[in-house]
């Protein structure tokens, strides 16, 4: 394998790992704010809950749309993979009641 091909492959892998980490951090923010959203609903603050819900989806949607538009499909897929990994982590770390 030539050195140029090896460099391109390693660059693609490093980029995918970085985008996965960025997606993971976005997912942590998204799913932890879901917990806040549930607390607003249970606390009898429906307007705050709706506002937080809309803000949560707008933030995540805009971030993913920006990644897709500016950087392309591979960063979008890697970021989405990180976001789904964060979902799994937040759900597993939620204390059982």
Image (tube, grey):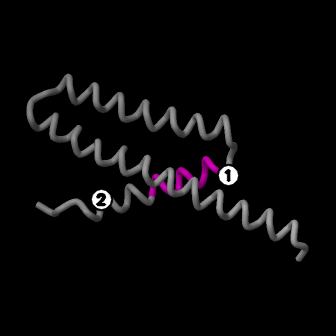
Q: Main secondary structure of the magenta part?
A: helix
Name the image quarter holding the N terminus: bottom right
Image location of residue 23, percent across then percent down: 49, 51
| Residue that carries the numbered disc 1 in the rendered image | 74
Q: Are marks 2 and 1 in contact (CB under 8 Å)?
A: no
The one of 28 and 41 positioned closer to us in this rendering: 28
Q: Which residue shows up at 73% across the image and 67% down it?
A: 10
Left or right: 30 in relation to 52:
right
Q: Residue at x 22, y 41 (%)?
A: 36
Q: Earlier in the sequence, mark 2 or mark 1?
A: 1
Q: Quadrant of residue 9?
A: bottom right
Q: Which mark is residue 46?
A: none
Left or right: residue 12 versus residue 23 is right
The residue that appears at 46% across and 52% down in the rendered structure is: 83
Q: Residue furthest bottom?
A: 1
Q: Residues within 10 Å of mark 2 (few under 14, many from 20)?
A: few
The Cα atoms of the two marked residues, 2 and 1, are separated by 26 Å
Q: Secondary structure at mark 2?
A: helix
Q: Quadrant of residue 69?
A: top right
Residue 35 in percent (x, y) is at 23, 46
Which marked residue is nearer to the observer: mark 2 or mark 1? 1
Question: Residue 58 placed where, x, y %?
Answer: 43, 30
- SS label for mark 1: helix
What residue range appears in magenta?
A: 74-84
Q: Is residue 47 magenta?
A: no
Q: Specify whether 85 is left or right of 16.
A: left
Quarter of the figure that contains the C terminus: bottom left
Q: Position of residue 44 (x, y in %)?
A: 9, 30
Q: Residue 91, labelled with which disc?
A: 2
**Which residue occupies 55% across, 51% down?**
79
């Amino acid at each position: 394998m030539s050195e140029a091909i090896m460099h391109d492959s390693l660059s693609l892998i490093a980029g995918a790992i970085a985008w996965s980490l960025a997606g993971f951090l976005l997912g942590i923010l998204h799913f932890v704010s879901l917990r806040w959203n549930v607390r607003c609903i249970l606390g009898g603050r429906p307007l705050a809950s709706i506002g937080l819900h809309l803000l949560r989806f707008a933030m995540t949607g805009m971030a993913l749309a920006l990644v897709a538009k500016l950087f392309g499909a591979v960063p979008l897929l890697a970021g989405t993979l990180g976001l789904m990994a964060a979902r799994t982590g937040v759900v597993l770390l939620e204390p059982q009641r």
